[in-house]
Image (cartoon, coloured by chain):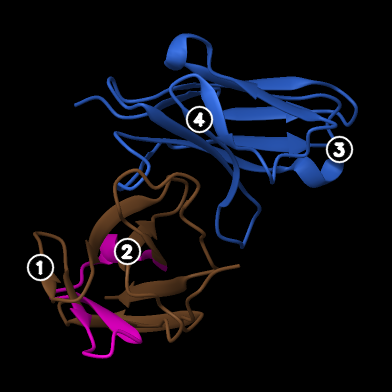
Chain colours: A blue, B brown
């Protein structure tokens, strides 16, 4: 089975610029998650989708972060404008159902300079 | 906040068993114990999970105390490739439960030494 695909693998941008990350979950996985992992810390949930609807976005900084999952498959996470503290690895994960284990992608490492 | 407590780091000799402890003294009756690990530059990888009984799979064994307040992940013959951060997480595993996501703490950094 193919894993969770994420792109790009690395991204370097200047502060106040915008950036977008893409995630393709495992086929048939209805639940999709975006996590942010700052260096030295465990991953922190940003948003959870069930099909194309948002289940939990309570920790998403909505003034600058947005995410969508059109057609309930691929998802994009956008940051506009970026701040220095957004430097982190952004991980996408998917699962068949919320109560089952997740499969994570390799992440996108974002550096804001 | 994470509901578990783990030592920040541990060392283990290659070929020996690695025993990683986790304290979850406030665990609820319907919460499972999950273990994930994260190898450098990769996303977290599922290892094993359990409710009450001990569990074993091809990767590891999970030993849960009778009172369920702590558990131990056992890698029976650690290799250099097992060097990673190991996360112990408790969460509800019931069907239909939305919003109960995996909350990752800082985990235990396991170093397997040659």
Secondary element at image label 3: loop
For image coordinates 39% across by 75% down, the residue present is B28
Subunit of mark 1? B
Q: Where is residue A1 in the image (x, y as percent from the top left)?
A: 19, 26
The quarter of the displayed image where residue A24 is located: top left
Have a look at marks 2 and 4 and say if they share a chain: no
- Residue assigned mark 4: A49
Marks 2 and 3 in Cβ contact (< 8 Å): no
- Residue assigned mark 3: A83
Above or below B90: residue A101: above
Above or below B66: residue A106: above
Secondary element at image label 4: strand
Instruction: Count neighbours of disc 3 (C-alpha within 10 A) and say few if under 14, some if 14 to 19, many if 20 or more.
Output: some
Marks 1 and 4 in Cβ contact (< 8 Å): no
- Residue assigned mark 1: B56
* Image depth: mark 2 or mark 3 in front: 2
Have a look at marks 2 and 3 and say if they share a chain: no
Magenta stretch containing residue B66, yes or no?
yes
Secondary element at image label 2: strand
- Quote the CA–CA distance across marks 1 and 4: 31 Å
Above or below B44: residue A13: above
For image coordinates 23% across by 88% down, the residue present is B65
**Which sits earlier in the primary sequence, circle 1 or circle 2?**
2
* Image depth: mark 3 or mark 4 in front: 4
Subunit of mark 3? A
For residue B34, the mark is 2
The answer to whether residue B10 shows anywhere in this view is yes
Q: Give the range drawn in magenta.
A: B63-89
**Which sits earlier in the primary sequence, circle 3 or circle 4?**
4
């Amino acid at each position: 089975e193919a894993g969770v695909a994420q792109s790009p693998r690395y991204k370097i941008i200047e502060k106040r610029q915008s950036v977008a990350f893409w995630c393709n979950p495992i086929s048939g996985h209805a639940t999709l998650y975006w996590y942010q992992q700052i260096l030295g810390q465990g991953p922190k949930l940003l948003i959870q989708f069930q099909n194309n609807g948002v289940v939990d976005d309570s920790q998403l900084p909505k003034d600058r972060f947005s995410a969508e999952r059109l057609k309930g498959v691929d998802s994009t996470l956008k940051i506009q404008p970026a701040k220095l503290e957004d430097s982190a690895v952004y991980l996408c994960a998917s699962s068949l159902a919320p109560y089952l284990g997740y499969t994570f992608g390799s992440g996108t490492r974002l550096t804001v300079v | 906040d994470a509901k578990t407590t783990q030592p920040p780091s541990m060392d283990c000799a290659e070929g020996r068993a690695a025993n990683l402890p986790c304290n979850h003294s406030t665990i609820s009756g319907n919460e499972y114990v999950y273990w994930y690990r994260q190898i450098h530059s990769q996303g977290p990888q599922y290892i094993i999970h359990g409710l009450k009984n001990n569990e074993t799979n091809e990767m590891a064994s999970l030993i849960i105390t009778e009172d369920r307040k702590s558990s131990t992940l056992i890698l029976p013959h650690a290799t250099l490739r097992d060097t990673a951060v190991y996360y112990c997480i408790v969460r509800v595993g019931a069907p239909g439960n939305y919003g109960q996501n995996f909350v990752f703490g800082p985990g235990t950094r396991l170093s397997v030494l040659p």
